[in-house]
Image (cartoon, rainbow, N blue to C red):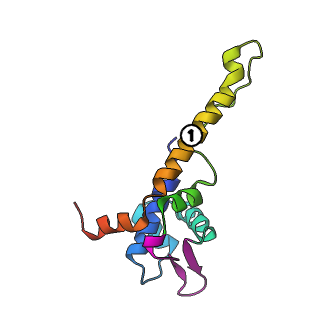
Amino acid sequence: MVDTRFSVSVQIMVTLAYHSDELMSSSSLSKVFKTNPTFIRKLVSNLVEAKLVKSFLGKGGGIKIARPATEITLKDIYVASTDDKTLVSAHKKPTIKACPVSCNMDKIFSDIVEGIESSTKNYLAKKYLSDILKVCQKGTP
């Protein structure tokens, strides 16, 4: 199963940046994304916890972007949205002690996963929410 938390979180953040002068509800976002409001609320909760989004409770409440899009990297969103779950992971099967392949796979895949995560985060640290927002502000392709 493909994990969509990061991509949907980026879309939430771009939407909030695009409508930075207004409060939005998770219900309205779920309609735009055609997905379950509970899923959106969980993602928004993670973004609020990471201080990327501000939440206002009560009648007339909603959410809005917490900082300018020029100050938010895609790494910030990635870290907030994935709950420390890596892009890839190794299966967790019991090792066969007599098999040198089986005995070494955990270490091998730990190194691979660490490398992928490090490369991904380094790449995303160079990309800003404002870069995506500029593309969206140009209009539909």
**Is residue 57 part of the magenta span, yes or no?**
yes
Q: Position of residue 131 (x, y in %)?
A: 36, 64
**Which SS class for mark 1?**
helix
Q: Dot 1: few (<14), some (14–19), or many (≥20) neighbours within 10 Å? A: few
Query: Residue at the bottom extreme?
Result: 59
Q: Position of residue 118 (x, y in %)?
A: 56, 46
Q: Where is residue 97 in the image (x, y as percent from the top left)?
A: 77, 16
Task: In this rendered view, identify the residue nearer to me: 15 or 97.
Answer: 97
Corner quadrant of residue 39: bottom right
If the image is split into quadrants, where does the C terminus sit? bottom left
Whether residue 87 is visible, yes or no, is: no
Query: Residue at the left extreme?
Result: 141
**Is residue 141 part of the magenta span, yes or no?**
no
Q: Where is residue 105 in the image (x, y as percent from the top left)?
A: 66, 25
Q: In this view, does 19 lie above or below 132?
A: below
Q: Which residue is drawn at 50% across and 55% down?
A: 6
Horizontal side of 134 relative to 92 (left or right) equals left
Q: Mark 1 points at which residue?
A: 115
Whether residue 126 is visible, yes or no, is: yes
Q: Is residue 25 above or below residue 42?
A: below
Residues drawn in magenta: 52-71
Task: In this rendered view, identify the residue nearer to me: 78 or 35.
Answer: 78
Q: In this view, does 93 lie above or below 63?
A: above
Corner quadrant of residue 101: top right
Task: In this rendered view, identify the residue nearer to me: 30 or 14.
Answer: 14
Q: Which residue is drawn at 63% across and 55% down?
A: 83
